[in-house]
Structures are given as structure tokens and as C-alpha cells.
């Protein structure tokens, strides 16, 4: 019987695990990878204590902190969480765990582009991670589909990777990003062209991406590009638990100020919950609060 099972190893899950180790709880942290979407961030300038670093570097710092407590992430995928009497069963692809509490930190995944050619060219010029795949397009022309902070972050990433030309296809009348410093940095570059009111219609090519078709004010247009980066939001990773806890219309797990869900003993932290502001620093704070709440719950329950 575990005290807590932590699902996900992004900023929220890692922070919860460090707090669990310090509280001397019996726990496991389960995730298919380590770092979550923070790994995809180019420049992080708002994580307290670190003036400017990228997501990969910050996650390396997190890993060093975990190593101080000998915390090891169990690489596995959670398929189902079930309630049984006064405990929970966490079922993964490989094992099954009994636990007093669960902290869901499963984050989110990129929303897929649903137009002709998107599936065909995924991995062949169409990508969902500028940090991961950007270096492959040095010296080439690319398009970013999206107009929020994620699209701007991708643009900033690509600017640092020697991309020749970057088109930002924004379906809205103007960019919707909230990070005004980032917006100014990206849009003032001579390499960047923002195309507003652009609805993406098709990804074209032969063996690899050669172009992108979009509609603007009723007219269909085409850009000759060798790469397409999709940044149109994210979907919460809640399939394994959505039948157990309350979910809102955005598919986020509803929590209270203590990160508690509608089911006593289950907590949710980071991007997967309905707390506004999907940022690394907010996720880390959520993870800390969730573990402290779980600790109080375990102490009362005995």
C-alpha cells in the first residue's frame, strides 16, 4: 500500500515527488517521460531565481534536485484509476498499484491539426515541437499554425535555429498571446511575417511537406514552405480518470484551492486542472500544494 501515487513527471509531478520524499512518504512517480511540456519551452524568463534559461536546462535542474532524494521516475503509462473501498487502484500498462491518495499531474498534449495532409506529413515536415524538430529546418522556410503564446514561443525558438523565413498563420484578426514582450520580440523580426484571418486548409507535398494552403477573406492562398509547426492549443490528458472525477467543459479536472478533486483522496496539479495560467512556475506551485494536501489527508485518515 502506497501513501501516494503521482501520475506525470512535469513541473507539477516532480515538485510533488520532492515534497513526498521530504515528508518520508511511500510513493511512486509514474510517467512515460520526464519534463512534460516544459521541455518544449525555448526561453523561460519568469521562473523565480532563474533569469533566463530554456526548458531543457530547467528540467535538468529538476532532475538534479530529484537525485538529491534518490527519486526515480517509473517509466510507464497509466491506463485507469479506480476507487476501491477507501483506497485507489492505479493500473498501468505493466503493473497495478494500491494507494491511499493519487496526485494527477498528467498535463496536456498538443492538439492535432485536422486538415487534409496533416496526418500524412506528420514527421515528414509537419511537427508539434519547435524545440525538438526546429534544427532540421535551418535555412528553410516554415509556417507556424496558431496565434497564441505557444505559437509565439515556437517562433522565438525557430528564430534561434537559423530558419530563413517564418510565416505565422493566425485564424484570428490579431495575435492572442498574452506575453507582450515575447510578441514584440518575435513580430519585429524581419524573418517573421504574421498572416491574420488565415484558416489553414491543407498541407501539401510529395514525400515531404512542400506547402500549406489557407483561406483568407474567402480567397484560397498557398505558401511554399518546407516545414509546418502546429501550435493550436493542447488537450488535457485525462482519459484514464475522467470517469471518476469531475471534468469541466475544457476537459480539465475541477479542483478547489487545496488541489482536491471531487473525489476525496485524489488531487490534481498543473496543466491538467482548471486553475488558470498554464505555466511551469504555476505547475510547480500546484504540485507542492497538492502533496501538502495529500499529506494532511493521509494524516487525518491514519
Image: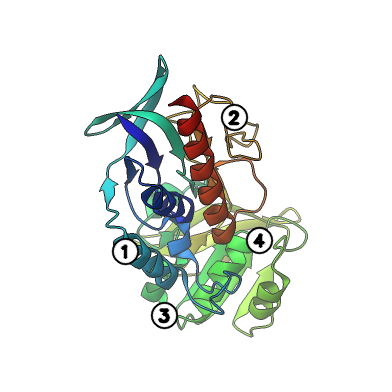
Closest to the observer: 51 or 32? 51
- Other-residue count near label 3 (Cα within 10 Å), few / some / many at <14 / 14–19 / ≥20: some
Is residue 215 left or right of 210 when viewed as pictured? Answer: right
Residue 294 at x, y percent in the picture: 49, 37
Q: Which residue is mark 2?
A: 247
Q: Residue furthest left?
A: 94
Closest to the observer: 211 or 230? 230
Q: SS for tag 1?
A: helix
Q: Which residue is mark 3?
A: 138
Q: Which residue is mark 4?
A: 147
In the rendered structure, which disc, 3 or 1, sits on the residue that comes first in sequence? Answer: 1
Q: Is residue 93 above or below residue 30?
A: above
Is residue 245 left or right of 71 when viewed as pictured? Answer: right
How far, Cα to Cα, is label 3 from label 1? 38 Å
Q: Is residue 266 above or below residue 37?
A: above
Q: Of the residues tagged 1 and 4, which is closer to the observer?
A: 1
Q: Which residue is mark 1?
A: 68
Amino acid at each position: 500500500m502506497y501513501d501516494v501515487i503521482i501520475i506525470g513527471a512535469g513541473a507539477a509531478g516532480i515538485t510533488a515527488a520532492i515534497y513526498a520524499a521530504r515528508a518520508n512518504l511511500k510513493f511512486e512517480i509514474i510517467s512515460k517521460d520526464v519534463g512534460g511540456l516544459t521541455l518544449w519551452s525555448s526561453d523561460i524568463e519568469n521562473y523565480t531565481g532563474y533569469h533566463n534559461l530554456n526548458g531543457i536546462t530547467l528540467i535538468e535542474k529538476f532532475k538534479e534536485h530529484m537525485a538529491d532524494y534518490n527519486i526515480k521516475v517509473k517509466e510507464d503509462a497509466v491506463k485507469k484509476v479506480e476507487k476501491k473501498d477507501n483506497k485507489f487502484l492505479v493500473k498501468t500498462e505493466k503493473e497495478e498499484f494500491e494507494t491511499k491518495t493519487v496526485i494527477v499531474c498528467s498535463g496536456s498534449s498538443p492538439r492535432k491539426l485536422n486538415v487534409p495532409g496533416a496526418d500524412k506529413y506528420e514527421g515528414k515536415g509537419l511537427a508539434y515541437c519547435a524545440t525538438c524538430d526546429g534544427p532540421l529546418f535551418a535555412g528553410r522556410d516554415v509556417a507556424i499554425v496558431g496565434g497564441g503564446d505557444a505559437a509565439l514561443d515556437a517562433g522565438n525558438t525557430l528564430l534561434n535555429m537559423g530558419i530563413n523565413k517564418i510565416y505565422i498563420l493566425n485564424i484570428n484578426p490579431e495575435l492572442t498571446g498574452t506575453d507582450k514582450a515575447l510578441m514584440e520580440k518575435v513580430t519585429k523580426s524581419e524573418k517573421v511575417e504574421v498572416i491574420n484571418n488565415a484558416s489553414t486548409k491543407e498541407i501539401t507535398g510529395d514525400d515531404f511537406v512542400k506547402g500549406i494552403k489557407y483561406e483568407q477573406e474567402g480567397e484560397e492562398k498557398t505558401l511554399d514552405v518546407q516545414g509546418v509547426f502546429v501550435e493550436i492549443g493542447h488537450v488535457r490528458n485525462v482519459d484514464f480518470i475522467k470517469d471518476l472525477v469531475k471534468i469541466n467543459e475544457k476537459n480539465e479536472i475541477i479542483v478547489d484551492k487545496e488541489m482536491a478533486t471531487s473525489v476525496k483522496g485524489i488531487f490534481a496539479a498543473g496543466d491538467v486542472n482548471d486553475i488558470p495560467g498554464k505555466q511551469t512556475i504555476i505547475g510547480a506551485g500546484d504540485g507542492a500544494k497538492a502533496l501538502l494536501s495529500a499529506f494532511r489527508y493521509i494524516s487525518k485518515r491514519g
